[in-house]
Amino acid sequence: MAAILAVDDSASIRQMVSFTLRSAGHEVIEAIDGQDAVDKLRYNAVDVILTDQNMPRMDGLTLVRILRAREDCRNVPILILTTESSDEMKAMGREAGATGWLVKPFDPERLINVIDTVMSR
Amino acid sequence: MHSDDRPGKPAAAGRGTTAARELSSGAERPVRAGILAAVADLERLLQLLDQAGGDLMDRFSGFDQLLGEISRDAAQTPLARHAEALRAELLGATTAMQFQDMSTQLVEHALSELRTLAQRLGDEPGPQGRSEAPRVRRSPVSQSGIGAGSIDLF
């Protein structure tokens, strides 16, 4: 079981992600945008972060860059889960330090498998 | 209609830029009104999507909670197996249930473009008598279906 931070400004996506990951036995903490994620990570240690890209206040790529500069989050897998699917955006994600790029909508089984894969690396 | 009064026709020589502006705004007014009507429709669509999505999520959540209770209360019985089968079916619906997020982003993008167009049509022409061409922003959603998206691990 892993502790996973799910970051998305869409309540429905947060709910879908939480339902999917909890059904696989994971604990899920939710954040409504990048800034909320940074705040929640002050008090919570997590094993994986799953974040949207386009969000108010702080987007996913900014969140990745901020967390990669933090000692406690440097090695935490960060997956971007977004509707953005261009190669250019994926390259930016890779450059920022993201672990992977998942295009919405997600398939629940594949999402659970990806979480297992990045945790076992 | 006098031929010189046709909307969009270039101003006659000697009538100056004011006349040209009046002719231009005459042609733009119905276009702007149409765009604003489309904006109002899309705003209503966003509200409907939000309400329908919220209602679906509430019921989804309630169903999930009930399944959890059934699984606990009927542990080690055939009913628990049925509950797990139902949960698997519910999980299978999560891909399609993400339609609200995708459609909301698409509608918000279309709204933003239309508002910019409407605003520009209402603008006074610039120094050269013409506003700069608006830059079309890329849509954040490129998918045309609700099948699962790609996965790239770096």
Image (cartoon, coloured by chain):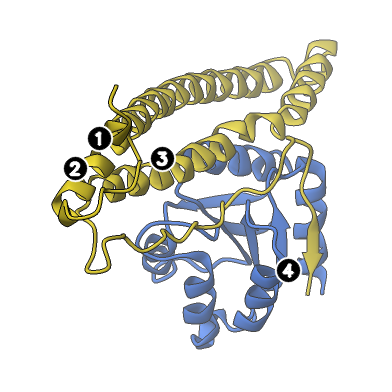
**Which residue is identified by label 1?**
B26
Tags 2 and 3 on a common chain: yes
* Image mark for residue B111: 3
Q: What chain does badge 4 belong to?
A: A
Mark 1 or mark 3, whichever is nearer to me: 1
User: Mark 1: few, some, or many residues within 10 Å (few <14, many ≥20)?
Assistant: some
Q: Work out whether mark 1 precedes mark 3 in sequence or the reverse, and give the earlier one.
A: 1
Q: What crowding class fits label 4: few (fewer than 14 Cα within 10 Å), some (14-19), or many (20 or more)?
A: few
Element class at badge 4: helix
- Type of amino acid at the residue the image marks with label 1: Gly
Label for residue B22? 2
Query: What distance separates the C-alpha of mark 2 from that of mark 4?
Result: 46 Å
Pointers 2 and 4 in contact (CB under 8 A)? no
Structural distance between the alpha carbons of marks 2 and 1: 6 Å
Query: Above or below — where is B101 with respect to B68?
Result: below
Q: Marks 2 and 4: which is nearer the front? A: 2
Q: Amino acid at mark 2?
A: Glu
Q: Which chain is blue?
A: A
The quarter of the image holding the N terminus of chain A is bottom right
| Label placed on residue B74 | none
- Give the CA separation, mark 3 to mark 4: 26 Å
Chain B, hue in figure = yellow
Tell me the distance, in whole angstroms, between the alpha carbons under discs 1 and 3.
24 Å
- The answer to whether residue A10 is visible is no
